[in-house]
Image (spheres, rainbow, N blue to C red):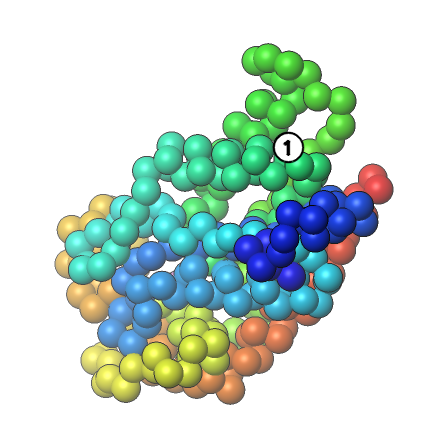
């Protein structure tokens, strides 16, 4: 159930039975030679839509650009400052809260967003709880869920890709985009097949250490069928997490 595909009357009717909404959040950044620039936003969106279907929940518009400063030496990457992303999340949530939404479930596709999303929740709570102006009488809660996280997802990544999963342009996220958008699959040879691992500081150092953009991964092993396993498992896990979130103190 996509917010964008409802009428205002349908949203009002939904609010009569649920105060929950799912918001996908991703990034627009390089993902190596066979990964799409939109990988993190595409993954978050496809998982969020699946969870929305499974849980009968409303899904809001995707926040498509995240905090991706360290990818800026690769063409096509976009970034926003953490303060900008905090402002966007704050304004999205308080817009929806005005209509009666109270449980905000963010499905995230980008590790670099995590700290900023958490900071935005603190900003939202301070505003909504009336720390600086008018006090509200009801409760608003935000929750962050990274689609790749949790025991079932880590076990699946280990089973399917082992040490080739990596930490950026991972085999699983590339597989998931191949499942979601089979027409966009890139047929390129990865050299070396598995990228180097390690730490970095800033965009120039990142590009020097990881010249094709990947870290520790071999997304050449990705296939749409493998992507479907990650898709189905993530949706099943997150639908449970979402239901528990709605049920807290209900
Ligand atoms: Ni990614």
Residue 46 in view in this figure: yes
Asked if one can make out residue 111 in the rendered structure from this viewpoint, the answer is no
State whether residue 125 is above or below residue 118. above
- Hey, which quadrant is residue 212 in on the image? bottom left
In this picture, is 43 found above or below 205? below
Q: Is residue 154 above or below residue 10?
A: below
Q: Is residue 118 left or right of residue 56?
A: left
Residue lying at the far top of the rendered structure: 133
In the depicted view, which residue is nearer to us: 143 or 140?
140
Q: Position of residue 235 (x, y in %)?
A: 63, 68
Quadrant for the N terminus, please.
bottom right
* Residue beneath the point at 43% across and 78% down: 181
Q: Position of residue 100 (x, y in %)?
A: 70, 37
**Residue occupying image coordinates x 18% and y 60%:** 75
The quarter of the displayed image where residue 189 is located: bottom left
Number of marks in the rendered image: 1
The residue positioned 50% from the left and 61% from the top of the image is 44
Q: Residue extending furthest right?
A: 250
Apparent side of residue 229 relative to residue 10 in the rendered image (left or right)? left
The residue at the point 46 percent across, 84 percent down is 224
* Local SS, label 1: helix
Question: Horizontally, is 27 left or right of 191 in the view?
Answer: right
Give coordinates of residue 231: x percent, y percent: 56, 73
> Which one is nearer the viewer's eye here, 132 or 101?
101
Respond yes or no on whether mark 1 lies under 8 Å from ligand 1: no
| Crowd around label 1: few <14 · some 14–19 · many ≥20 (10 Å) | few
Q: Position of residue 33 (x, y in %)?
A: 25, 74
Q: Quadrant of the C terminus?
A: top right
| Residue beneath disc 1 | 98
């Amino acid at each position: 159930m996509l917010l964008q595909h409802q009428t205002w009357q349908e949203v009002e009717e939904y609010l009569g039975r649920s105060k929950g909404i799912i918001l996908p959040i991703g990034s627009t950044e390089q993902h190596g030679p066979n990964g799409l620039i939109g990988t993190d936003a595409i993954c978050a969106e496809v998982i969020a839509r699946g969870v929305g279907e499974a849980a009968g929940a409303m899904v809001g518009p995707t926040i498509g650009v995240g905090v991706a400063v360290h990818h800026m030496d690769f063409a096509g990457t976009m970034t926003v400052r953490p303060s900008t992303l905090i402002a966007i999340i704050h304004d999205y949530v308080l817009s929806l809260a005005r209509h009666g939404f109270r449980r905000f479930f963010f499905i995230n596709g980008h590790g670099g967003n995590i700290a900023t999303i958490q900071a935005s929740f603190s900003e939202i709570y301070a505003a909504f709880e009336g720390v600086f102006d008018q006090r509200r009488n009801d409760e608003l809660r935000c929750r962050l869920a990274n689609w790749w996280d949790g025991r079932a997802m880590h076990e699946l990544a280990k089973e399917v890709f082992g040490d080739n999963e990596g930490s950026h342009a991972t085999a699983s996220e590339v597989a998931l985009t191949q499942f979601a958008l089979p027409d966009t699959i890139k047929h390129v040879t990865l050299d070396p097949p598995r990228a180097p691992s390690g730490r970095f500081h800033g965009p120039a150092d990142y590009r020097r250490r990881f010249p094709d953009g990947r870290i520790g991964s071999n997304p050449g092993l990705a296939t749409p069928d493998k992507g479907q396993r990650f898709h189905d498992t993530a949706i099943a896990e997150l639908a449970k997490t979402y239901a528990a979130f709605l049920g807290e103190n209900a």
